[in-house]
Amino acid sequence: MALYILSLVFGAIGTAIDLFSKMMKSKKFIIVYMTLASLFFVVSYICLRNPLSAIANGINLGRGIIYLMLIKENKSYKHYIAPVFILLTAFIIPFIFLWTGPMDLFLLFATVIATIALAFKSTLIIRIGLILNSSLWAIYNLYIKSYINLICNLGSIAICIGAIIVYNVILIRRKKAREAELTDEPPQANAKPVEKTFIDKLNDMEDDEE
């Protein structure tokens, strides 16, 4: 009973920090607070005697530290490939030995999605990845009856959707409208519209402010 209460306490603290992380505007601070939250989730799942979930959050903790180092050094996405491979390998090995049933696959897919999504620069891609990640964790936590962590997952989904609407839609449209008002150059009559790639369209939905 005492361990269960401890799991609720640490889970509640981790939940508060994790939900706060999803409100951040930049990739750097999203990862900073997610990493801190993972530390509390590790303890929470240890108290629940769930080693695989504790290891998954341990991987999240290590991932955050590595990614923050890459962000500090302003490394390109190519430098994330090796860390992503190492992190996923580090989780797959204990995953095989600690396998308890098909529900464990939700942890595997959640870890893979978040690890890859957080390697991108685009906060839009990151938030979409975190919505998928939280959805998989929500199903798993419902199954193991970890309700405090389930609340965190559902809250994360709602906040990420809200952040996409605010940061990647409303504010970007306002910014483009202001830029259009400041542009005095008339459109060229014979100018052909430039066809944008998918990545260009994603970048158009990003605010350059850190």
Image: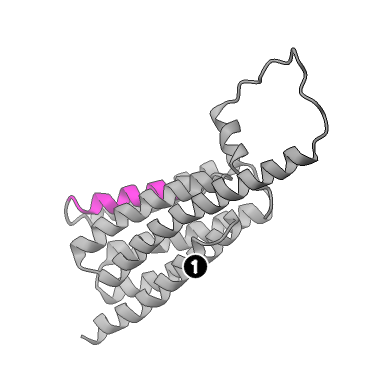
> Label 1's element?
helix
Indicate yes or no whether the magenta region holds residue 128.
no
Compared with residue 176, is residue 103 higher up or lower down, i.e. above or below?
A: below
Secondary structure mostly seen in magenta is helix
Q: Which colour scheme is used?
A: one colour
Which residue occupies the extreme top position in the image? 190
Circle 1 residue: 20
Residue at 18% from the left image edge and 50% from the top image edge: 102
Quadrant of the drawing holding the C terminus: bottom right
Amino acid residing under circle 1: Phe
| Magenta-drawn segment | 102-115
Q: Nearer the viewer, residue 79 or 188?
A: 188
Indicate yes or no whether the magenta region holds residue 105.
yes
Residue at 24% from the left image edge and 58% from the top image edge: 140
Compared with residue 192, is residue 106 higher up or lower down, i.e. above or below?
A: below
The quarter of the displayed image where residue 145 is located:
bottom left
Q: Position of residue 39 (x, y in %)?
A: 44, 70
Horizontal side of 12 relative to 197 (left or right) equals left
Q: Where is residue 124 in the image (x, y as percent from the top left)?
A: 52, 46
Horizontal side of 64 relative to 174 (left or right) equals left
